[in-house]
Amino acid sequence: MIISHKHKFIFIKTRKTAGTSLEISLSTICGPNDVITAIDDDDEKARRELGGRGPQNFKLPMSAHSLGEVAGMLFGKSRKQFYNHMAAQEIKELMHTGQWDSYYKFCFERNPWDKVLSQYNARGGDRAFGNVEGYITSGEVARLRGYDMYSIKRNVVVDDIFKFEEMDESLQTISERLNLNTPLQMPTYRAKGNRRKDKRHYHDVLSDEERELVAVIFAREIKLLGYEY
């Protein structure tokens, strides 16, 4: 995730929505005081080569901790910090209220049937779960629910939710909102782009039962953004 004080935006990174590639692109416009969380080593290498800033300022200064919290660190408790795939509720708790309220907050969402199939393949596919239904019923699929990340107390708290399927138009809108001289572009490097071996459309893979399970689990996202099977 990224908090840019330079451009006054907060990028909430949802799962399986090209979030790492988006981070790489956004990090090229960030300043030295902006918050940028870490990504995988290979992706960090690509980010450096593309001129983006690496992880920085993600640990809160000691002045942001109470005396009790500082004392706890002496006994092994962790320092407060921002991290990858951090939900809105947690981000808000670590920010100044004025910044959270005034900064432009955005994220991306993806057709849930496509998202589930993408993550299923990334996590090992049939070898790991037997079939898609095995993955869905394992409970792990709950981590893909974007609504939980960009809402607080069931209320959506971001200014814009862009669709993965409309990436080019979305980047143009974000660039205009941030008044960038050069529009944002996705890097030619595709983070984790080689992990999905099965490129079939979800219509050709999911059973009727699997389709319905996804529809139930992601009912809020489907209703909010009008996704259809």
Image (cartoon, rainbow, N blue to C red):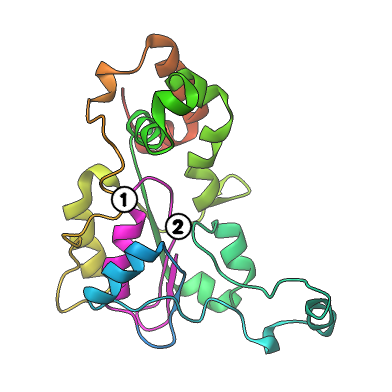
Does dot 2 land on a helix, a strand or a loop? loop
On the image, which quarter does residue 54 sit in?
Answer: bottom left
Residue designated by label 1:
192
The reply to whether the C-beta atoms of the residues labelled 1 and 2 are less than 8 Å apart is no
| Position above or below: 31 against 82 | below
Residue 108 appears in view: yes
Does dot 1 land on a helix, a strand or a loop? loop
Counting from the top left corner in percent of width and height, residue 178 is at 28, 73
For image coordinates 23% across by 54% down, the residue present is 190
The total of numbered circles placed on residues is 2
Q: Is residue 209 left or right of residue 188?
A: right
Most foreground residue, 12 or 55: 55
For image coordinates 23% across by 75% down, the residue present is 49
Which residues, given as a range, are shown in magenta? 1-30
For image coordinates 61% across by 62% down, the residue present is 90
On the image, which quarter does residue 89 sit in?
Answer: bottom right
Counting from the top left corner in percent of width and height, residue 229 is at 31, 22
Residue designated by label 2:
158
